[in-house]
Amino acid sequence: MKWIVGLGNPGTAYQGTRHNVGFMVVDLLAKRWGISVTQSKCKGLIGEGNVGGVKVALIKPMTYMNLSGETVRGFMDYFKADLEDAIIVYDDMDTETGRIRLRYQGSAGGHNGIKSIIQHTGTQSFNRIRVGISRPKPGMSISDYVLSNFPKSEGELLKTMVEESCDAAEFALTNTFERTMAKYNR
């Protein structure tokens, strides 16, 4: 089974924020694949389906960002799922808005959701789609920035970036992650 975890914060207050692009990707995949992500399990919302003959789970942790690893670990334990079959989708300040970067390992880079996943899985090696949100202007606090909405001027970039993340996740269902990185890291 392949499983895709979109990181974000639960609740309408966080819906359109930069920190919630992972949820946006999972929501679009759910719509594309006709999967309902409503089953409450492992401290998250889960939806299961079949995409082109591949069993897939879509996951949105409901723990708040900095405890995302609890949902990932819970899912792995409950479903006997392998971390190699996961893709973690999250916001990345080191990637400019409008771009995505795929990686299969690395540090948390200051991202608390990734820090939590590393802590709960005991490894830095897992597939990731990093969705660009750029850095805040000097003087703006990082937490205020990631919890703010994308400005209207970035609406088209956001839409393209979320769609491209979905395309990459879909491609990864039937291709190696190395091949997926080669195709989507421009």
Image (cartoon, grey):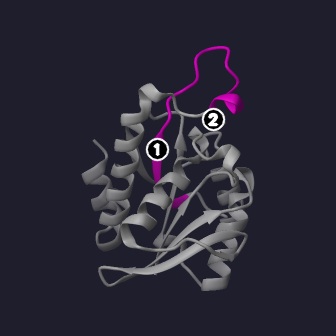
Q: Is residue 180 left or right of residue 158?
A: left
Determine the residue located farthest toward the left in the rendered image. Answer: 183
The picture quadrant where one finds residue 157 is top left
Nearer to us in this view, 85 or 158: 158
Where does the magenta region start and end? 125-146
Q: Is residue 134 above or below residue 184?
A: above
Please name the residue shown 32% across and 58% down the image. Answer: 167
Nearer to us in this view, 139 or 108: 139
Q: Is residue 118 above or below residue 175?
A: above
Q: CA distance from mark 2 to mark 1?
A: 12 Å
Residue 61 percent coordinates (x, y): 66, 63
Q: Is residue 44 left or right of residue 86?
A: right
Residue 79 percent coordinates (x, y): 60, 84
Indicate whether residue 134 is drawn in magenta.
Answer: yes
Indicate whether residue 131 is drawn in magenta.
Answer: yes
Please name the residue shown 60% across and 63% down the image. Answer: 60
Q: Is residue 78 above or below residue 88?
A: below
Label number found at residue 146: 2
Under circle 2, the secondary element is helix
